[in-house]
Every structure is written in structure tokens, then in C-alpha cells.
Image (cartoon, rainbow, N blue to C red):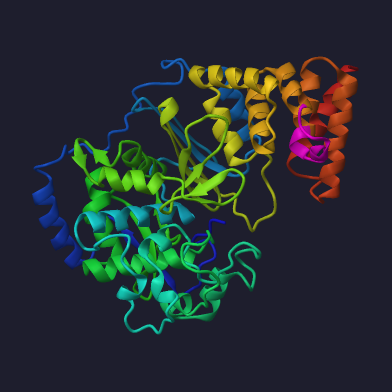
Amino acid sequence: MNPGNKNMPANVTCHFKTASHMRFTQILIYISFFLNYSCQTNSNNDIFVKESSLKAVGFDQRIWAGIDSSILRGNYGLMNSVLVIYDDKLILEKYYNNWTRNQLHDIQSATKSVTSALIGIAIDKGYISSVNQKMADYFPQQRMDSLKREITLENMLTMSAGLKWDEESKKYNESGNSLTDMYNMRDDWIDYIIEQPMSDRPGKRFNYNSGISILLGSIIQSSSKMTVPLFAEKYLFHPIGINNYQWADHFGLTHCGGGLSLNSIDLAKFGYLYYNNGKWNGNQIISESWIKESLKPRYKSDLKACYGYQWWSIDSLFDLIPIPYVSGNGWQFVFLIKEFNLIVVFTGKNYGNEELKTTFSPHELLFGILSCNPKFKNRILSIYERQKINPSKNIYEAIVLAYCLNTLGEYEKTIDVLNHLNQNDSDDVRINYFMGKSYFNTGDSKKAEKYLEKCISVCKDKKSPNTGYFKLANDLLEKINKNGM
């Protein structure tokens, strides 16, 4: 669902922003802007200083040690970084696979959220009138039927434009995927995107479309008379201390659907800006109203996710406040969890078109990290008590609850939650694995074997015997046999 620049065609180029690579005209504009802006801002924009730690803020280091060990074993696939900010302090910054703090990372479709921020800034600055403005206003040379002329910027931001577009039924390297076909078949991306027929009336339903985000970039460029990278540098990157990035373009058209690369700490800065309602060092970089509108869940994507203005959110999970997040293919994530004063950042190389290499999901990694927080732990235990009276009918909620309880070492409670699920869910590898692991840790080897063997059987049926839960279940069975349990 979240493509980026991994499969970009050869005619897409990447432009680096460093002091030695800026174009002469960019340097002049940059110097002028810097002189005007430096009087208003703190010169130290890199506000993240590792001035605290998990231990200092009372987080459970034992739980994190288990997660860290699991990442190192590959149970979360190819992770490159995990950062956690708590109460405005960077309490965890860990890199994997020889990744470093200053190394640029492709953020894939997380680029879309940056693009959304730039649209908000363009509206704040008066370059664009409002989200009600029509897409057709910016592409007067394009032939559009009456239905297509109804598309607004808000429809574009919420992926509800109504254009026929398919990025889900085919992998990103396969013919028939709309984005891949655009890369492979057309030099003029704008024509290709706008020429797609209408499948729905604008605003009717959510349909993920990276082409729409590319059009939004073109709108920023035409309305501001600046390239997207220069606009971003002037109004977003420089004010929050992002001084190094890479942004791909296609014959001068910036790839705003997935072409941006940032280092992990700068990706965290972007999340921090939204977490603080658009303010940075006391300056309002993006209007608070735009932040609020962007993060508001608007369209349901699936059981657990909603979509706003190029931002996702985890919605309808227990009684927790919705968790907005930035998402990109390969596990590029920024989660904003205000209820527990946390920002969590991941980067990785778990691309959807590669062979399965990961066991746990990014949401499980998120909730594992959250489980280190005593406040979240208490909330989970409270939720469990209510679930005993009114068992959840939502399998996602039940599995998240079971995973968190399992992470906390509450194995009997994990068994209790999963026992409430409908028997139709018994072929779910996660349910069988966590049941097996919980029985293993409570000393019931017979029941542990039953569930672990079922987990292995389901993995074989799904033709993934050498990856994921198969290996975890097999490892536990070997321990049972070795210890004669």
C-alpha cells in the first residue's frame, strides 16, 4: 500500500541538498531567507539531545532488551533504526545493519505526509486558497470531463479523488500496478495520472493513489513558482533544522509520492513538529488548524487504519485515542502517541515485493515498545479486566491485547484473551503461536505442543516454512523436547 522510489525507472533522477551541491540560484535564495529567518529562531535547531534514557524515565528495560534481541534475530525483518522520544527527550536511538545517524534513508510513501505539510504551508502562506479549490484549476491544458472537474484538493489529500487506480492487487514490480505502469510506460506522469478514467464520484471512497500525491507536488510548484525542494527548504526543512536530504524528480517533476530521503533523526523532527501542533522553538511553522485537520481520521482503509490528509491513523482500538502515523513501504514509520507522550520512529528495508523476512508486524513492534511504558502497561491490564466481562469481537484488538500481555509476561491472561476468540480464527498463525508460547511459559507442555504444531502446520500450508512464525514455533518445540517438558 505504500510505494516509494525503490522501483523507480532509470529516468528518475535524485537531487541532493548539501552545502556543496546547491545550485547557485538556490544559494542566493537560501542566504536571503537565512538572514531574515535567523533573527527569529534559535540557531540550534537540532533539539534532540540524548539527555535521558529508558531507565531514567522509568521504562521497563527488560522488555526493551527482549525486543532489541528479537530485532537482532530478524524477527522484525531488516530494521535500520528505532527512535523513541518521550516527554520531549530522545530516550532511545538504536541503529541496525550498520546504519548510522546521519545516513540518508529512503522514506518511501512517508514522503506523502511531507507533501501534505507543504500543501498546508502553501495555504497558510496564501499560495493556495483552500482545500476546496479544484484540481482542474491547476491543469488548464488537460482535458477533463465534468465529473473529473469536481475533484478538490481535499479529495486528493484524502485519496478519494475517484480516479481509477490500482496499487493493491499487483505488486509494485508487476505489470497492472498503476504506479509501475506509469513508471514503465509514460514519460509524462501528469498526463498519465489525469487521463485515468473515473471509477467513483469524488469523495465517495478511499482508494490509495500515489499519482495523486505527485499531482499535489505539481500544484505546489505551479502555485508558489518554486520547485518543491526549494519550497520545502524555505518553509519547512530549514526552520526545523533539516539540512541534508535527497528528493527524486522526473524531468523536473518532484516525486512527491515517494521520492524523499531523510536521516532518521530528521524524520523524527518532522514527527515532533506535528506532535507539537506545528510549532518549533516557539515559531508556528505550520498552522495548528492544518495539523488538526490533517490528522483527523476521515476514511476507513481496513479494520485498523484510517486516512486523513496523507496521514494514517490507528483507529477504533479499545478506548485509546487514535494514533496518527506516517507510513512508507519497507517499514518507514513515525507514530504520534500523545496519550502516552511518545513519538516512535522506525526505518527498515522490509519491502512488500520481497520474500517474507519478518515475523511480527510494525504495529506489534510499536505496541511492544509502548509496553515498556508503565502508564501503557496499566492501561493494558485495565483493558484486559474489561475484556473478561465483554470479550472483544475484533480480532485485531484481541491479538494486540494478547501480544501486549505476552510481552509483559502475563501468559495466563494471554491465554484467557485468545480463548475468547471465535474458533474460525484458529488457523491464524499468531493466535496459535502466542497460545503455544504462553502455555510453554506456564509449564503446560502438552497444550504448548498442540498450538505450536498447529502454527507450524498453518505456516506450511501458506508455503512459508522457513520464515516467520514457523521458526519461532519450531524453536520452542525444540526447547520442549530438549528439556523433556
Q: Residue at x 55, y 24 (%)?
A: 371
Residue 330 is situated, as x and y percent measured from the top left of the image, at 56, 51
Is 420 located above or below residue 160 in the figure? Answer: above
Question: Is residue 287 toward the left or the right of residue 144 in the image?
Answer: left
The answer to whether residue 289 is visible is yes
Quadrant housing the N terminus: bottom right
Of residues 315 and 479, which is closer to you in this image?
A: 315
Q: Residue at x 87, y 36 (%)?
A: 454
Residue 243 is situated, as x and y percent measured from the top left of the image, at 28, 49
The answer to whether residue 20 is visible is no
Quadrant housing the C terminus: top right
Q: Residue at x 36, y 55 (%)?
A: 116
Task: Determine which quarter of the picture holds residue 264.
Answer: top left
Of residues 224 and 299, which is closer to you in this image?
A: 299
Residue 412 is situated, as x and y percent measured from the top left of the image, at 74, 17
Q: Is residue 475 magenta?
A: no
Is 72 located above or below residue 155 in the figure? Answer: above
Q: What count of labels does the image hold?
A: 0
Residue 268 is situated, as x and y percent measured from the top left of the image, at 38, 40
Of residues 433 and 153, which is closer to you in this image?
A: 153
The region drawn magenta spans 420-431
Is 322 located above or below residue 192 in the figure? Answer: above
Task: Determine which quarter of the picture holds residue 241.
Answer: top left
Q: Is residue 421 magenta?
A: yes
Q: Residue at x 69, y 20 (%)?
A: 388
